[in-house]
């Protein structure tokens, strides 16, 4: 399945947003998140705790901010594809009709080779060129967390009901929202 790449992380300013990106990536079926920015042990710890309690496999790794170009170069050298989420891109409603999108959503092998980039405060102009496809979730400015969630929901099969094996905790769903667990 798909990997998420977050470009930009500053420990104090971005900790909540980057944590939420990691949690959304995991919940909607990504295999991991790679973050270019300041290494943040607290985020690694809190996301790893969620994975060990709620199950499944999910990786979280940091690299120095300047390493983003090399990371994208390597991704391409390994025959990977890149989607960059940006309000300037092709609207998802059009991109969904595109053969490329259909190939991605219908093949686990293709999804494994896919990197989905979300930016931070400022996105280097070159990112737009490295991307095979620049895709917008509405063409209005909003948030990396919102755009990632909606994009993965559309791309990943069964994204709203993924099984997470080896969980210590699993919610027993209830309309009243009672805090009950199956295990
Ligand atoms: N002004 C920044 C720039 O240089 O593009 C964007 C800042 S925005 C708060 C952070 C990230 O949210 C963007 O890099 C993009 O990944 C995501 N984002 C915001 N609005 C979006 C939209 N309408 N569609 C897709 N992604 C969006």
Image: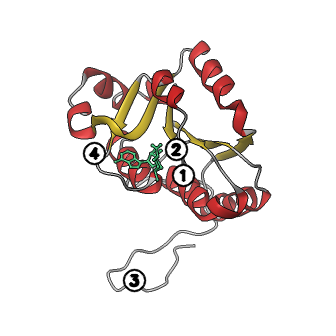
> What separation in Å lies between label 4 and label 2 (alpha carbons)?
15 Å
- On whether ligand 1 comes within 8 Å of the CB at mark 4, the answer is yes
Q: Secondary structure at mark 1?
A: helix
> What separation in Å lies between label 2 and label 3 (alpha carbons)?
34 Å
- On whether ligand 1 comes within 8 Å of the CB at mark 1, the answer is no
Q: Secondary structure at mark 2?
A: loop
> Can you tell which quarter of the image residue 34 is in?
top right
> Can you tell which quarter of the image residue 136 is in?
top left
In this rendered view, identify the residue nearer to me: 68 or 114.
68
> What separation in Å lies between label 1 and label 2 (alpha carbons)?
18 Å
Q: Which residue is mark 2?
A: 119
Q: Which residue is mark 3?
A: 177
Please state which of the two labelled residues, at mark 3 or mark 1, is closer to the viewer: 1
Please state which of the two labelled residues, at mark 1 or mark 2, is closer to the viewer: 2
Please state which of the two labelled residues, at mark 3 or mark 4, is closer to the viewer: 4
- On residue 26, the disc is 1
**Which of pointers 3 and 1 lies earlier in the amino acid sequence?**
1
């Amino acid at each position: 399945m798909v990997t998420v790449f977050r470009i930009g992380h500053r420990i104090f300013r971005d900790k909540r947003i980057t944590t939420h990106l990691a949690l959304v990536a995991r919940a909607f079926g990504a295999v991991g998140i790679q973050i270019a920015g300041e290494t943040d042990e607290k985020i690694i710890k809190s996301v790893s705790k969620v994975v060990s309690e709620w199950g499944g496999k999910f990786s979280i790794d940091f690299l120095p901010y300047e390493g983003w170009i090399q990371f994208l170069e390597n991704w391409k050298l390994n025959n990977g594809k890149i989607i960059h989420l940006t309000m300037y891109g092709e609207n998802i409603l059009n991109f969904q009709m595109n053969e490329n999108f259909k190939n991605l959503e219908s093949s686990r092998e293709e999804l494994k080779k896919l990197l989905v980039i979300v930016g931070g405060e400022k996105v280097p102009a070159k990112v737009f060129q490295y991307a095979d496809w620049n895709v917008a979730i509405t063409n209005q400015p909003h948030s990396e967390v919102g755009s990632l969630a909606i994009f993965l929901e559309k791309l990943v099969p069964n994204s709203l009901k993924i099984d997470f094996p080896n969980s210590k905790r699993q919610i027993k769903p209830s309309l009243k929202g009672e805090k009950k667990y199956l295990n």
